[in-house]
């Protein structure tokens, strides 16, 4: 299938412990899906397994981009194919400036030379649209950035790389109200041409970036899927309600 990211019956473990217990999900270009769910239910594990983090071992299932097996490829190749992961906890990289990091990442992912002046100009515009101070371009990547500044730097990376499918793990955590709007604006600008998987705990981001579907994660699986209104229900009722619903289905 073209323009789709398919996750089929994905199982993954960490240090021999099964965390993902069969996740199936299809995202098409232009669609935004949200994943919500309690702490420790495996949301970040799903993101890491899709991207190929070495700590997360896929034991069963498939990840297909346009029908092509992503699990057979190393992480950098997955990125070249158009997969992107915005981390819940972005890493600090001492000695690598933000501008130089982004330029190298773009050259690597696109396989093309990136003319510096042109790049700098478009980066200036993107930074300004995300209200990132120009001086951040020369600062070491994420080093000493506040929580919110790190998240903005992840969105900047998203805008530079324009991936085909973006998995954004808690892009909104720790953001103030204005920053949530800014981050939402950034996501909004790529969502028509990409597929987006938004992992979040709060409906506030989803009020700005209205998802096509909401999936609720519980114990390594998607327990329930619905439309955007599901996020409202969850915020109101919490997750216990879901367990009760599930039990009543089982009984
Ligand atoms: N490196 C690791 N070593 C051991 N256990 C891990 C590791 N990473 C994750 N886990 C465990 O896997 C489970 C799922 O973690 P994960 O980070 O995927 O949850 P999450 O749904 O993203 O939670 P949160 O909402 O708190 O971000 C947790 O019980 C966690 O302790
Ligand atoms: Mg997480």
Image (cartoon, helix red, strand yellow):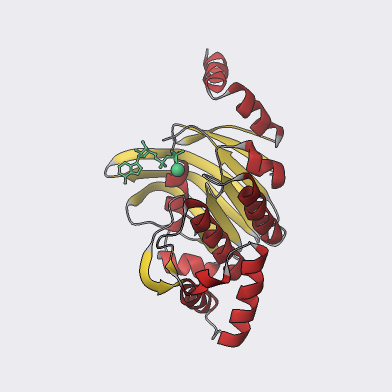
Residue 33 in which image quadrant: top right
Q: Is residue 12 left or right of residue 196?
A: left
* Residue that appears at 53% across and 71% down: 135
Residue pictured at 65% horizontal, 33% vertical? 231
Tag count in the figure? 0
- Image point (52%, 52%), residue name: 148
- Say whether residue 243 is left or right of residue 53: right
| Relative height, residue 232 to residue 113 (above, below) | above
Give the x, y percent position of residue 114: 56, 84
Q: Quadrant of ligand 1?
A: top left
Query: Vertically, is 81 above or below 49?
Result: below
Residue sitting at the far left: 15
Q: Is residue 90 visible?
A: yes
239 and 14: which one is in front?
239
Would residue 10 be seen by someone viewing this image from the given angle?
no
Residue at image x 48%, y 71%?
Answer: 98
Q: Quadrant of the N terminus?
A: bottom right
Q: Residue 189, position in %: x, y?
A: 70, 60
Give the percent coordinates (x, y) of residue 43.
47, 42
Question: Residue 144, position in %: x, y?
Answer: 41, 60
Q: In front: 183, or 221? A: 183
Q: Nearer the viewer, residue 200 or 22?
A: 200
């Amino acid at each position: 299938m073209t323009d789709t990211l398919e996750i089929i019956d994905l199982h993954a473990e960490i240090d021999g412990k099964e965390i993902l217990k069969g996740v199936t999900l299809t995202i098409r270009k232009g669609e935004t899906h949200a994943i919500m769910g309690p702490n420790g239910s495996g949301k970040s594990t799903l993101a890491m397994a899709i991207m190929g983090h070495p700590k997360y071992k896929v034991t069963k299932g498939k990840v297909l981009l346009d029908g092509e097996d992503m699990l057979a490829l190393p992480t950098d190749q997955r990125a070249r194919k158009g997969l992107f992961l915005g981390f819940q906890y972005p890493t600090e990289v001492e000695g690598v400036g933000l501008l130089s990091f982004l330029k190298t990442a773009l050259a690597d992912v696109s396989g093309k030379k990136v003319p510096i002046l042109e790049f700098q100009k478009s980066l200036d515009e993107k930074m300004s649209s995300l209200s990132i101070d120009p001086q951040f371009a020369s600062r070491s990547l994420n080093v000493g950035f506040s929580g919110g500044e790190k998240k903005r730097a992840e969105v900047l990376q998203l805008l530079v790389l324009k991936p085909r499918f973006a998995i954004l793990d808690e892009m909104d955590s720790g953001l103030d109200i204005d920053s949530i709007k800014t981050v939402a604006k950034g996501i909004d600008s790529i969502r028509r041409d990409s597929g987006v998987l938004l992992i979040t705990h709060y409906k506030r981001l989803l009020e700005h970036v209205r998802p096509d579907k909401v999936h609720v994660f519980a114990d390594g699986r998607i327990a329930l899927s619905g439309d955007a209104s599901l996020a409202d229900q969850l915020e109101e009722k919490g997750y216990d309600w879901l367990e009760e619903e599930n039990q009543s289905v089982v009984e």
